[in-house]
Every structure is written in C-alpha cells, then in structure tokens.
Amino acid sequence: MVHPAVKPLSDLIGTWKGEGEGFFPTISSFNYSEELQFTHSPNKPVIAYSQKTWNLKSGQPMHSESGYWRPKPDGTIEVVIAQSTGLVEVQKGTYDMKEGVVKLKSELVGNASKVKEITRVFKVENCELSYAVEMATSLTDLQPHLTASLKKQALGCHLITGDITTYTTSQAHFLTNKYDTEC
C-alpha cells in the first residue's frame, strides 16, 4: 500500500544494485558498485532515498547520500539530497512514469565552493534503473559526470545466471557485483 501522492513513482520503491562510471574534466575516470534504495511509509507523501557506492576493484566505500523525493499530482517533483561530502542539493523537476523518466535540476547547491549546478535523469525500464548526472562547477559548464545501470532486487525478479551481488553490513562493501536478473 502506498500513499496516493507516491503511487505514480511506486515502481521505484525497492532496492537497486549495479555499477556505474564517473568522469569529469578535472578528475580521473572511475568505476563503482552501487546500492540505491527507495523506501516509503504509506502514511507519508514522500519517498525516502539513499545511495551508497563502493570502489569497483577494492570494495572500499566511496560516496553516500540520502534524502527525500516529494512527487506532486501535476507531474512535478521536489527532491532534497544531503551528500556525505557535506554538499546539499535542492532539486525540482518532472516525472512521467508512462515513459519511466524522472528529470531533476538543482535549484540550490549548498555548502559547495566549486559545484554550481547538478542535473539528474533517471530512467526505469524492465526492472532496470539507469541514470545520468551532469554537473557544472566554477571552472566548467554543465557536462556529464556519472552514469549507472542498476537492477531491481525485488519480489518478482529472479536470478537467471551469474553471481549475485553480496553486501555485508559489517564490512560495508560489495564482495562481488556481477549478476543478471530478469523480471
């Protein structure tokens, strides 16, 4: 059961795992494992969001962020995100779940001396969530920064082949990250 305001985004609710790639003109490219969670309390018109990443090779924690997504009946959405680096984003955007797309653009990037703007585009299709993040800094215009592809870890999905991603809370990293699911 979900709150009526959240119902259009209910396909997001659950745990998503996969891999991503980061790049930007001022840094070296990198690959990462990721776990994204969207949770919901039926009496609240919001979705809680949390994201954690680990270095793909070493398994060391890299980044985490959390916040809330608040969809509106008119197809707009408000999002707040606090990153482990101290950066805070207030984003507004739109959602069209017939197309499976959520588009966000920063209204405010707080506590960031260099980051000026962030956009995020999420796409859901066939139990897969992909996203692209773009960023502008005081030295660069808006350009690609992160892309990822995640598979939903939910009831109704089943393993066909490969190694399941194993996450241990005590070690706080992915031991393996190759898996293949089908819904």
Image (cartoon, grey):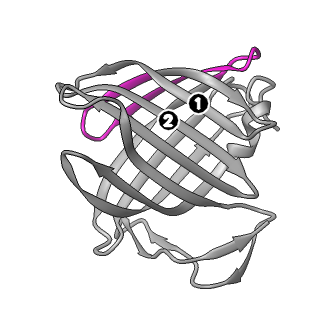
Circles 1, 2 touching at the beta carbon (< 8 Å): yes
First-in-chain label (1 vs 2): 1
Question: Dot 2 corresponds to which residue?
Answer: 120
Q: Is residue 13 visible?
A: no
Q: What secondary structure do most residues of the magenta stretch adopt?
A: strand
| Residue at (61% x, 55% y) in the render | 15
Q: Quadrant of the C terminus?
A: bottom right
SS under mark 1:
strand
Q: Image point 73% across, 35% down: which residue?
A: 9
Residue nearer the viewer, 153 or 115:
115
Which quadrant of the view contains residue 103? top right
* Stretch in magenta: 71-90
Residue 145 part of the magenta-drawn span:
no
| Relative side of 155 to 89, left or right | right
Residue 156 horizontal side relative to residue 129, left or right: right
Task: Find disc 1 in the rendering and name its residue.
Answer: 103
Percent position (x, y) of residue 112?
Answer: 22, 26
- Identify which amino acid the numbered label 2 is placed on: Arg
